[in-house]
Image (tube, rainbow, N blue to C red):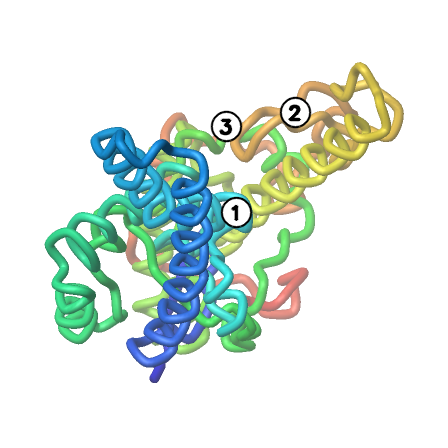
Amino acid sequence: MHEESELVTGEAVVLDLRVAKLASRALAMLLDVLVQFALLLGTFFVLTLTVPGEDESLALTLILVFLVLILVGYPVLFETLSRGRSLGKMAMGLRVVRVDGGPIRFRHALTRGLAGFVIDFWALGVFGAVAVIVSLCSSDGRRVGDFLAGTLVIRDRVPESAGYPAIGMPPGLEGWAAQLDLTRLPDDLALASRQFLARFGQLAPEAAHALGWSLAQQVGNALGTPVPPGVPPWAFLAAVLAERRNRDHARAMQAYAAQVQAARGYVSAGPGAPGYPQANGAQRAGPGSLPTGGQPAAPSPWSAAGSPAPSSATEADPPTPPSGTPAPVAENPFAPPS
């Protein structure tokens, strides 16, 4: 059982993925329980051979310790190392992700493991009854551990929806966007901008203009930069989100290069080391970092000649269609996203 669900990545890119529901999760859990049962049998066999029979307190203590380690440590270890997949989930093609679509980390896996042991399955869960009831009541099939950890179980082998194309950088705004400090942009505002651009062609022109200016001013206030004069609001938002995505990709490439160099015995894997990737001629250390090198930003073709930039985002055009004759469509260097 599954249903379509929208997930949002850390760069505010919406993905249509199928959420794993009770049936597939139950099969994955059954496989994991069989593995845990085999580990428990092996542990008990070793303890019977190594622990003296007359020391019952020591034997009981060791049994309890290994019971908790296997029931909690097994899912935590596998989901941390494999980024959200235990052996059962691998067999069923499932994966645990954050509610924003990003990969889980140790703290998420630990929260899910502890909640599964105490609430969902074993201690208070009446052998999984709590997890089943909560999952059936949740539209996304989440159990208590998922709610506490902020996670979701999805079908791992589902492609991205073609309904949400990637946002490209508007021509001429590359240099301007490279100077932005994107660490100040909230994720929820980035998501709202991404959804607006994805549905831009479905909105009435007046509504699209008003909503675009409202979002552009909010983003400009968050970043501390106004909308450049002559730049449409959708182009401003597209430039911000495209630059945010490019910096995330550059950071991922740098992390991968550092791992490769460390595996080959390199002592230094920082900027300037052989093979260290650069993004557009500039060193970018994170999704919101400012470039530290490269050529000066080229002037934007969207800016009007001799027109001073407004001092704040609130001084940009009002969130209503401006009066006067609009610019001819033929002069737009690119078409709005559909």
Q: Quadrant of residue 248?
A: top right
Residue 64 at x, y percent in the picture: 26, 40
Tell me the crowding category of disc 1: few under 14, some 14 to 19, or many 20 or more residues within 10 angstroms, Cα based: some
Where disc 3 sits, the SS reads loop
Q: Are marks 1 and 2 in contact (CB under 8 Å)?
A: no
Q: Position of residue 40 (x, y in %)?
A: 39, 52
Closer to the observer: label 1 or label 2? Answer: 2
Q: Is 145 left or right of 299, judged from the image as shown?
A: left
The CA span between labels 1 and 3 is 21 Å
Which label lies toward us, 1 or 3? Answer: 3
Q: Residue at x 53, y 66 (%)?
A: 90
**Residue carrying label 2:** 291
Q: Which residue is mark 1?
A: 230
In the rendering, which numbered label is found on residue 253?
A: none
Give the x, y percent position of residue 71.
Answer: 33, 50
Relative side of 300 to 91, left or right:
right
Q: Residues within 10 Å of mark 2 (few under 14, many from 20)?
A: some
- Residue, disc 3: 181
Residue 31: quarter of image:
bottom left
Viewer-nearest residue: 314 or 94:
94
Above or below, 328 relative to 74: below
- Disc 1 marks a residue whose amino acid type is Gly
Q: Residue at x 50, y 28 (%)?
A: 181
